[in-house]
Amino acid sequence: MFTPPPSEHELAAAGLTLEDLQGADVEIWPENQGAYFLFAQLQTQWRTGMSGATGLDYNTLFHKMDRMGLEPDEYEDLEDDVRTMEFAALEAMNKKD
Protein backbone atom coordinates (compact mmCIF):
# COMPACT_ATOMS: atom_id res chain seq x y z
CA MET A 1 0.00 0.00 0.00
CA PHE A 2 2.93 2.36 0.49
CA THR A 3 4.83 3.74 -2.43
CA PRO A 4 7.71 6.05 -1.61
CA PRO A 5 7.40 9.51 -3.09
CA PRO A 6 9.59 10.49 -6.02
CA SER A 7 12.95 12.01 -5.22
CA GLU A 8 13.51 15.76 -5.49
CA HIS A 9 15.59 15.07 -8.61
CA GLU A 10 12.73 13.11 -10.23
CA LEU A 11 10.27 15.86 -9.35
CA ALA A 12 12.56 18.58 -10.67
CA ALA A 13 12.78 16.72 -13.99
CA ALA A 14 8.99 17.12 -14.24
CA GLY A 15 9.08 20.74 -13.04
CA LEU A 16 7.57 19.90 -9.65
CA THR A 17 8.52 20.18 -5.98
CA LEU A 18 7.53 18.09 -2.93
CA GLU A 19 5.06 20.82 -1.96
CA ASP A 20 3.21 20.26 -5.25
CA LEU A 21 2.37 16.70 -4.15
CA GLN A 22 1.18 17.42 -0.64
CA GLY A 23 -2.52 17.12 -0.03
CA ALA A 24 -4.80 16.79 2.92
CA ASP A 25 -4.51 13.62 5.01
CA VAL A 26 -7.44 11.26 4.61
CA GLU A 27 -8.66 9.12 7.48
CA ILE A 28 -10.29 5.80 6.68
CA TRP A 29 -13.02 5.03 9.18
CA PRO A 30 -12.79 1.55 10.73
CA GLU A 31 -16.10 0.44 9.19
CA ASN A 32 -14.72 1.29 5.71
CA GLN A 33 -11.27 -0.29 6.03
CA GLY A 34 -12.28 -3.68 4.59
CA ALA A 35 -13.79 -2.10 1.49
CA TYR A 36 -10.84 0.26 1.09
CA PHE A 37 -8.25 -2.51 1.31
CA LEU A 38 -10.20 -4.71 -1.12
CA PHE A 39 -10.54 -1.80 -3.55
CA ALA A 40 -6.80 -1.11 -3.25
CA GLN A 41 -6.05 -4.76 -4.07
CA LEU A 42 -8.00 -4.32 -7.30
CA GLN A 43 -5.94 -1.35 -8.47
CA THR A 44 -4.66 -3.23 -11.53
CA GLN A 45 -8.00 -4.87 -12.35
CA TRP A 46 -9.68 -2.13 -14.39
CA ARG A 47 -11.50 -2.97 -17.61
CA THR A 48 -10.41 -0.51 -20.26
CA GLY A 49 -11.51 0.44 -23.74
CA MET A 50 -10.79 3.12 -26.31
CA SER A 51 -12.00 5.79 -23.88
CA GLY A 52 -9.99 4.53 -20.90
CA ALA A 53 -11.22 2.75 -17.78
CA THR A 54 -14.82 1.56 -17.88
CA GLY A 55 -15.06 -0.28 -14.57
CA LEU A 56 -13.50 -2.94 -12.38
CA ASP A 57 -13.16 -6.57 -13.40
CA TYR A 58 -15.91 -8.07 -11.26
CA ASN A 59 -14.60 -11.61 -11.85
CA THR A 60 -11.55 -10.67 -9.80
CA LEU A 61 -13.63 -8.81 -7.22
CA PHE A 62 -15.93 -11.79 -6.68
CA HIS A 63 -13.00 -14.22 -6.57
CA LYS A 64 -11.37 -12.23 -3.78
CA MET A 65 -14.65 -11.80 -1.92
CA ASP A 66 -15.46 -15.53 -2.19
CA ARG A 67 -12.25 -16.30 -0.33
CA MET A 68 -13.10 -13.94 2.56
CA GLY A 69 -15.69 -16.20 4.21
CA LEU A 70 -18.34 -13.48 4.35
CA GLU A 71 -21.95 -13.86 5.40
CA PRO A 72 -24.41 -13.06 2.58
CA ASP A 73 -25.30 -9.62 3.96
CA GLU A 74 -21.62 -8.77 4.52
CA TYR A 75 -20.87 -9.86 0.94
CA GLU A 76 -23.53 -7.56 -0.51
CA ASP A 77 -22.52 -4.63 1.71
CA LEU A 78 -18.87 -5.00 0.71
CA GLU A 79 -19.79 -5.25 -2.97
CA ASP A 80 -21.89 -2.07 -2.66
CA ASP A 81 -19.04 -0.25 -0.90
CA VAL A 82 -16.52 -1.21 -3.59
CA ARG A 83 -18.99 -0.22 -6.30
CA THR A 84 -19.38 3.20 -4.68
CA MET A 85 -15.60 3.68 -4.73
CA GLU A 86 -15.46 2.41 -8.32
CA PHE A 87 -18.01 5.00 -9.47
CA ALA A 88 -16.19 7.79 -7.61
CA ALA A 89 -12.86 6.69 -9.12
CA LEU A 90 -14.33 6.59 -12.65
CA GLU A 91 -15.78 10.05 -12.15
CA ALA A 92 -12.39 11.38 -11.00
CA MET A 93 -10.52 9.63 -13.85
CA ASN A 94 -12.92 10.99 -16.46
CA LYS A 95 -13.10 14.51 -15.05
CA LYS A 96 -12.26 17.15 -17.60
CA ASP A 97 -10.28 20.07 -16.17
Image (spheres, helix red, strand yellow):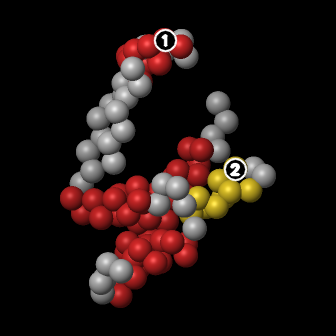
Q: Nearer the viewer, residue 18 or 86?
A: 18
Disc 2: CA contacts within 10 A as few (<14), some (14-19) or many (>=20): few
User: Where 72 sits versus 15, above or below?
Assistant: below
Measured in 3D between alpha carbons, the distance from the residue under mark 1 to the one under mark 2, in whole angstroms, is 28 Å
Q: Residue at x 40, y 15 (%)?
A: 8
In the figure, is residue 48 to the left or right of 58?
Answer: right
Screen quadrant of the C terminus: top right
Q: Nearer the viewer, residue 41 or 92?
A: 41
Which dot marks residue 12? 1
In the figure, is residue 86 to the left or right of 28?
Answer: right
What's under tag 1, amino acid-wise? Answer: Ala
**Local SS, label 1:** helix
Which dot marks residue 52? 2
Which dot marks residue 89? none
For the residues bearing labels 1 and 2, Cβ distance under 8 angstroms: no
Please provide percent x and percent y for residue 12.
48, 11
Q: Earlier in the sequence, mark 1 or mark 2?
A: 1
Q: Nearer the viewer, mark 1 or mark 2?
A: 1
User: Where 48 sits versus 95, above or below?
Assistant: below
In the figure, is residue 12 to the left or right of 23?
Answer: right
User: Where 44 sits versus 15, above or below?
Assistant: below
**Local SS, label 2:** strand
> Which residue in the rendered view is the most extreme toward the bottom?
72
Q: Nearer the viewer, residue 31 or 67?
A: 67
Disc 1: CA contacts within 10 A as few (<14), some (14-19) or many (>=20): few
> Which residue in the rendered view is the most extreme toward the left?
30
Image-quadrant location for residue 49: bottom right
Q: Residue at x 32, y 78 (%)?
A: 68
> Which residue in the rendered view is the most extreme toward the right?
50
